[in-house]
Amino acid sequence: MSTAVALGAAALCCAFAMTSAHAVQPAISMGYDHALVLRADGTVWSWGYGNGGQLGLGNSSTRTSPTQIPTLQNVVQVVARGSFSMALKADGTVWAWGDNSGGRTGGSGTSVPVQINGLSNIVSINAGTNTAAAFATDMSGQVFAWGSNSTAQLGSGQTSGGGNPVPRLVAGAQGAVAVSASDAAVLALRQDGKVVAWGSNGNRALAPVAGTATAPVVIDALGTVQAVASTSINISGQYYALKNDGTVVAWGQALTNAPFCGQPGVLNSQYAVIDISPIQGLSRIQQIEPGDGHTLFVDADGAVHACGVNSAGQLGDGTLVNPSREAPKIARVAGLPPVVAAAAGSANSAAIGVDGSVWVWGKTSNLGGTDKSTTAVRVMQGNGAPFDAGRVGDAAGTFAGGQTGPLSNVTVDVGATVSTLHRGKTGRVYVAALAGSILLFLGPNGWTPYTGGAVPAYLGGPLPRTVPVRIASGLNFSGLEGVQLVVGYGVGDDASAAAEMVRAGRYKVVHTLN
């Protein structure tokens, strides 16, 4: 049986709803003094300081070992910031709990997850550190923001006081696949690799445009990149972009005890601003994980590197040595297995190994370590056994889709989120439609029926984090009721990628036209 026919048969007999149980790549996120782990089974576990309800367990107690949040299932992404937490479910809904500064939990503060109204078909979430705004990106590439607007984080170019609990569309950020926010400013990565920035722009640290705050503006000087990160350093912030060749550039605020990532001699005043410049000593990077004053970088071998403030040992190199103007510092985190995920919080850091092991370092007295854990500490369960985030042997990826409006005037979006194990690797993304026994693939020249041979790919090359695909916008699809849309991806070139996708089962029926 050919690869494509096998895919069609599997889609017919093994289709399942977006809300059904599934495996995801384990992930971790760090707040001020709490942590969230997304296990491979789609459950969420929390521990640490709980005074603001940020653990999602219905109280304000502190937990020193991971505890499952019972009301969360089928989750695909988690975010911990300050005393605030957020989760994205596989059905595209967003849930929040903890500190309600600026209305980030959608209304009043809550110690259990509550759904954020007005959001659907979401594929990515993020939030600024401490008490800043929250963000969600939907399948069509639109960005929504809610919470504080004290530095124009909500995208209008104007500041305002008070809370904003209702998500609003960020005009000028269309085509986004992911967002990264500091306390005061935001970077959005578009599908075409361009970067859009908005929010606080003190000393033009964010973008080369006039004004202390800016509406969304493209940073043309960056060219195209594959990931962005915003680190909170004072008000202006410091920003990073992962280039397509695996190198990293940085720009923005460079105050004393800021990252100083391989940039000696750039400071001549207390409030100096770094122009876009490469970070020396980093290569083959696949992930950037920003925190509050420090940043982690994961390379192609799963090794973790760090730079920034090190007052609590959050750089993980066995020292408390801070970088300085004279001695920039890129640290190699010691004592870790190869990792599949990492996270930087406020004076703390964490990682998940390929074996499912979970590790923390830095200010981790409520997380299983000490106030100054300078090397990685294994996270343990309450019974003394090692905590395991689970493993996905072939890294399933995440797939979703949906429609807006009737078939006579319908908008349809589908997409894929690539596993952290595969981002940056050569692969192919496939989009198929199954109508009875007819299988069609979406390629560069539109839809083509499959009649054998090579399987047309929607996208090929280095795999990005997210691939949103708009199937239709205000079109008449009358008569196509019941057509199933399938999305998947494989690692490799041409036919080998399609075969690898089928072998790994890395595809899904994401929507049936109705």
Image (spheres, helix red, strand yellow):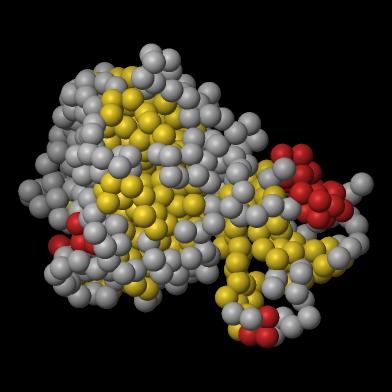
Would residue 192 be found to the left or right of residue 360 on screen? Answer: right
- Please name whichever residue, 446 or 330, is drawn nearer the observer in this view of the structure: 446
Residue 5 vs residue 17, the one in the foreground: 17
Extreme residue in the left direction: 270
Where residue 14 sits in the image (x, y, percent)? 77, 49
Q: Quadrant of residue 247?
A: top left
Q: Residue furthest front?
A: 58
User: Which of the two residues, 263 or 150, is positioned nearer the viewer here?
Assistant: 150
Residue at image position (48%, 29%) is 389
> Is residue 467 placed above or below 410 in the rendered structure?
above
* Image vertical order of residue 219 relative to residue 394, above or below: below
Q: Quadrant of the C terminus?
A: bottom right
Residue 184 visible in the snapshot: no
At x 23%, y 34%, the residue is 61
Q: Residue furthest top?
A: 384
Spot occupied by residue 372 in the image (x, y as percentages of width and height): 19, 23
Vertical side of 370 occupied by 75: above or below: below
| Residue plotted at (61% across, 55% down) | 18
Q: Is residue 401 visible?
A: yes
Total numbered labels placed on residues in the image:
0
Q: Position of residue 183 (x, y in %)?
A: 22, 54
Q: Is residue 302 left or right of residue 425?
A: left
Q: Is residue 361 left or right of residue 247?
A: left
- Residue at horizontal 60%, vertical 58%? 400
The one nearer the camera, 412 or 69, is: 69
> Which picture quadrant has residue 264?
top left
Residue 161, position in %: x, y?
14, 69
Vertical relation: 58 (above or below) 235:
above
